[in-house]
Amino acid sequence: MIVLVMNAGSSSLKYQLYNMKNEAVLAQGRVERIGMDSSIVTHEPTDKPEVRQVSEILDHNTAVRKVIDLLTHAEHGVLKAMTEIKAVGHRVVHGGESFKQSTVVTPEVKLEIRKLFDLAPLHNPPAMMGILAVEANLPGVPQAVVFDTAFHQSMPQESFLYPIPMVLYRRHKIRRYGFHGTSHDYVSHKAAEVIGQPLKSLKLVTCHIGNGASCTAILEGKSFDTSMGLTPLEGLMMGTRSGDMDPAIVPFTMNKEDLTLSEVSSMLNKHSGLQAISGLSSDMREITDAMKEGDKNAKLAFDMYTYRLRKYIGAYAAAMNGIDAIVFTAGVGENSSVVRKAVVDGITFLGAELDDARNDVRSKEARFISTDASRVKVLVVPTNEELLIARDTYNLVKTK
Amino acid sequence: MNIRKVGVIGAGTMGQGIAEMLAFKGLDVYVTEQSADRLSQAMSAIELSLDKQIEKWALTQAEKKLVLNRIHPIQKLSDLSGCELVIETITEDLDSKKIVFDQLDRLCGPNVILASNTSTLSLTELAGVTAYPERVIGMHFVYPVMKTDLVEIVRGLKTSDDTFNKTKEFVEDVIQKKGVMVFESPGFVTTRLICLFINEALHVLEEGVASAEDIDSAMRIGYSFQHGPFEMADRFGLDSVLAALDRMFREYGELKYRPSIVLKKMVRAGHLGIKTGIGFFNYDKDGDRI
């Protein structure tokens, strides 16, 4: 079965086409700058040269049509006809409390996703536009939605509630939702496979550290706690996001610097994190390069970043009363051996011991980076959210 | 209808603010001014304002670039013909506005909404010079445009429901501000109430009841205004406040609108508020109180 996976942002649309028989990627690509007269489409068919086109793409509907045209194009395409696409899976950021797992799109599901616009005003509306655009361009093709929050719906109340008046939870559903769920879910399964033990018997901390970053405590195969909260601002220090801090800083700063709500929110989301401390970059590669050249601010940003990561791993080990493995994934987690070393070398008391040679190997494979004797296993598992979306979509549609 | 290209005629304080806000919301904005000089001044002012926002962490360098790329300075009115909405924000003078509307009416297709940012003038009269008065409407933004999420949507006598609904949808869904429906009347709601407030404060000052500083503190702290009446007037421009009061005084004929003598004196002295650095209070070139 051919499955198309879509990830729609406010002005972008990323896609991957899978043949589920062998889970092979047939093509992938992205449409950027939707809504402007010079939108860029980059289409990468697996066995053919890359195509780059600039044209006017004013909405997601046109973007989806463009993607289908490219997939079935005589020269650049990988399909004979669009009828070969048997299912479409969408990434939706926020599933609120309504969605505990992936689901097939129905009118009720669409209504429910709409109701959640309030909780994810930047992310859910474009996902909805993607769903509607597929409906218009591929009529009758079943669609599924896979939520970033769904995996974390297994958290117990003591993890997901904030100690603030309960009426706020009842009225506005203010609670921890957590994000990157698809990734934490995928890498935990993969890690258990590599370790060779059933996931249910393991206590894991998965660290998805890329541009955004979150840690999840996984107990009995389920999310037990996670570092992102109501929004993706809480938790670890990130590229441009602050992560945890005293909430009193918000009104205090607003008062001292005469800031509005949108200014302070922009400050914490776009002007904080690595960028703010290093004064240099939000990109960990640039931070580590500068650090090697003796840049003190880059070193401080690096130290704060890894320190906060160690604190979370320690906290989650305590939360689960034990830890069997630590998993690193996403841009920084998969590629930065220095970050991994700084983290693991600081938590040897837990029983984690890094194998420096293994840690320095660059690879696309899921692998151990701890020594054979290490009581707590440390792994790098490249994430693949698109594949998980394709699998969920396939499984949901196949049984229909 | 999908509004993506918006024309802004006149790039004074309000025109700059409107253009900057529209571009920030992701729209393509076409701005025109009387001369190339004024236009380039306006563009530098917009850039300065974006830089000030970066200082306040409201914007990143990349976002500033994107916003600036969406603002297109144009030389001729005819370059506006591709816009779906045109907002006029030239000086508050009926005859000048009539000339602009007459030209726009002939340039833009009958489905293009022609809006005026006037705060006191009659839209019905402005619409009178056009062949399609049903597409003429008022969009009165409140200074500072970026921060104030309110637009008075003003209906002239002939403004159609369709024009009003499209404008309301644009204001609330696209630029995400609250749109209040106002029927044509001098000063509408905001200008009428706030100018009376400022004028009464001037009377209180004239009578020696309290100092400007204390009157401002009383209203700011006592009633949660962001600025007191005098700083507010300095920020609007004392000449604009005087002009608005004068016009309402003429239109309504009621004494309560008669501008205070102190206000007239200050305008005659060229103490216009922030834009001249001196009004009731003193300001630096960034517009911050000294």
Image (cartoon, rainbow, N blue to C red):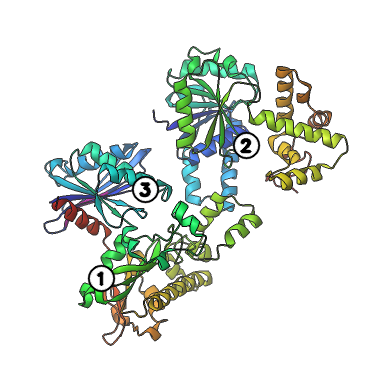
Q: Examine the rendered structure and indicate whether residue A270 appears above or below residue A331.
A: above
Kindly indicate the quadrant of the structure image that contains residue A130. top left
How far apart are labels 1 and 3 at the CA level? Answer: 34 Å
Q: Residue at x 29, y 46 (%)?
A: A109
Q: Magenta residues: mostly which secondary structure?
A: strand
Q: Is residue A28 magenta?
A: yes
Q: For mark 1, does the 10 Å Cα neighbourhood hold few (<14), some (14 to 19), or many (20 or more) residues?
A: few
Q: Examine the rendered structure and indicate whether residue B274 appears above or below residue A174.
A: above
Q: Is residue B28 magenta?
A: no
* Type of the residue with mark 2: Tyr
Circle 1 or circle 3, nearest the eye: 3
Circle 2 or circle 3, nearest the eye: 3
Q: Which residue is mark 3?
A: A124
The reply to whether callout 2 and callout 3 are in contact (CB within 8 Å) is no
Q: Nearer the viewer, residue A350 or A284?
A: A350
Q: Secondary structure at mark 1?
A: loop
Q: Examine the rendered structure and indicate whether residue B129 appears above or below residue A117.
A: above
Q: Which sits earlier in the primary sequence, circle 1 or circle 3?
A: 3
* Type of the residue with mark 1: Ser
Q: Which residue is mark 1?
A: A363
Q: Give the magenta part as a residue range.
A: A24-29
Q: Position of residue A20 (x, y in %)?
A: 14, 55
Q: Position of residue B250 (x, y in %)?
A: 73, 18
Q: Position of residue B238 (x, y in %)?
A: 74, 33
**Subunit of label 2:** B
How far apart are labels 1 and 2 at the CA level? Answer: 56 Å
Q: Which residue is mark 2?
A: B143
Q: Examine the rendered structure and indicate whether residue B24 appears above or below residue A191.
A: above
Report the side of B108 relative to A373 (left or right).
right
The reply to whether callout 1 and callout 3 are in contact (CB within 8 Å) is no
Q: For mark 2, does the 10 Å Cα neighbourhood hold few (<14), some (14 to 19), or many (20 or more) residues?
A: some
Q: For mark 3, does the 10 Å Cα neighbourhood hold few (<14), some (14 to 19), or many (20 or more) residues?
A: many
